[in-house]
Amino acid sequence: MVIQPGFNEETVNESDEKEAPEPSVRMPTGPYADYDEENPPSQFGMPAGPLSGSSESEDLSSIGVEEFLKKINISHDSSAEVDVVRDAQRVESRRERLEELIEDEERSEHSLEQSRAGLGIPHTKGERLRELEEAREKLEEEQKHIELAGQFNDVLDDFGDTRKYSKADIASIKKTGKTADGKAVLDRNGHAIHSDIAKELGHLYHSGGRKMTWGKAREIERIVDRLLHNFVEIAKGVVRGATQ
């Protein structure tokens, strides 16, 4: 990953300061918005469908389970930028190969289970199959991070547009998650982003980051999970109150 050092003040001209546009049709909802306690979420600001794009993919057709698991267990550098197109295609090819390996392992497990059943021996799921299922969860998690990167790279691009955000706005977003005049940061669909997430993006941009990193994607995913958990708890409280 290449991160430009420092905050490039030349890209943000205070004299060009303008207000960020407000949502024109609907109040922002979903776990990224600050209005969850009042309005139920109708969308999460996540891109629909798999991320598309063409790039060279790994040749995984000939590798076995052990080598495949080694690849899956290699962690991304937290400071490395997510290459949305390339990484999405890489994850997709790995998921396809993983399903093939799981099918093969399940057939072996089934044969072993039948053999043991004939001998009256109980059978439990093998360690190798459990490892492959854990690898499936890891790839699903990685796909979430790629989707978050695709969603919020657009916001980082907007931060560099002086027609949308001024230097004062960026400084305010970093501290409060709101613009200098208290307006919400908007995603590419014009929906408000929750202030906790906006602050993370503001910190990344202010430190010189212009693309989402794996570390930042993981941080934002934790925030989203927390917001969803809080919303569920609030909803449960409303239901309990209504039934009492």
Image (cartoon, rainbow, N blue to C red):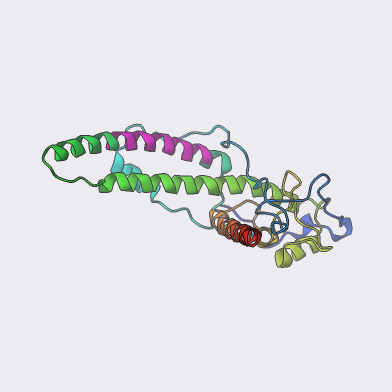
Q: Looking at the image, which is closer to me, 102 or 97?
A: 102
Q: Is residue 60 visible?
A: no
**Residue 102 falls inside the magenta stretch:** yes
Task: Please provide the residue range marked out in magenta.
Answer: 88-105
The prevailing secondary structure element of the residues shown in magenta is helix
Q: Is residue 172 visible?
A: yes
Residue drawn at 32 percent across, 48 percent down: 131
Q: State whether residue 227 is above or below residue 102.
A: below
Q: State whether residue 173 is above or below residue 212.
A: below
Residue drawn at 53 percent across, 34 percent down: 55
Q: Position of residue 213 (x, y in %)?
A: 57, 54
Residue at the farthest bottom position: 175
Residue drawn at 55 percent across, 32 percent down: 54
Q: Position of residue 43 (x, y in %)?
A: 66, 45
Q: Looking at the image, which is closer to me, 208 or 115?
A: 115
Residue at the farthest front position: 244
Q: Residue 128 vs residue 1: left or right?
A: left
**Residue 145 falls inside the magenta stretch:** no
Q: Position of residue 99 (x, y in %)?
A: 38, 36
Residue at the farthest left position: 119
